[in-house]
Amino acid sequence: MIVVDVVLLAADSGSGNTVLLVVVVVVVLGWLVSLVLHPWTACSACKGSPRHFGSVASKSFRLCSACGGSGRQLRFGARMFRGE
Ligand SMILES: [Zn+2]
């Protein structure tokens, strides 16, 4: 596994810069795995509640224009895993 190899390499060299690089690589890999497992987040415009109810006709609503009513948006970077 690449991560284990990189960590072992860093342990051998003992360089401070290499350890920092390994930490960055591990964090980035964790972020990429997170993007694959959970590519969606709540829409930033409506916070995941896409129905905007009227104040007069309280049962009527319109849908959030940013997410089209889904209440979700792709996380930053998740698009590269979706072939879009
Ligand atoms: Zn929205």
Image (cartoon, rainbow, N blue to C red):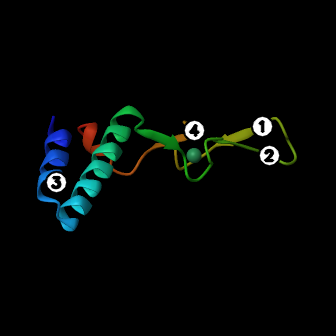
Camera-side mark, 4 or 2:
4
Along the line of sight, which residue is nearer the eye, 8 or 31? 8
At which x and y percent is residue 65? 56, 48
| Label 3 SS | helix
At which x and y percent is residue 30? 33, 43
| Label 4 SS | loop
* Callouts 2 and 1 close, C-beta under 8 Å: yes
| Label 2 SS | loop
Residue at 66% across, 41% down: 49
Q: Which residue is mark 4?
A: 69
The Cα atoms of the two marked residues, 4 and 2, are separated by 16 Å
Res. 41 mark: none
Res. 10 mark: 3
Q: Upstream in the sequence, badge 2 or badge 1?
A: 2
Q: Amino acid at mark 1?
A: Ser
Camera-side mark, 1 or 4:
4
Q: Which residue is mark 2?
A: 54
Q: Upstream in the sequence, badge 1 or badge 4?
A: 1
Residue 84 can be seen in this image: no
The Cα atoms of the two marked residues, 3 and 2, are separated by 59 Å
Q: Upstream in the sequence, badge 3 or badge 4?
A: 3
Q: Is residue 65 left or right of residue 62?
A: left
Q: Upstream in the sequence, badge 4 or badge 2?
A: 2
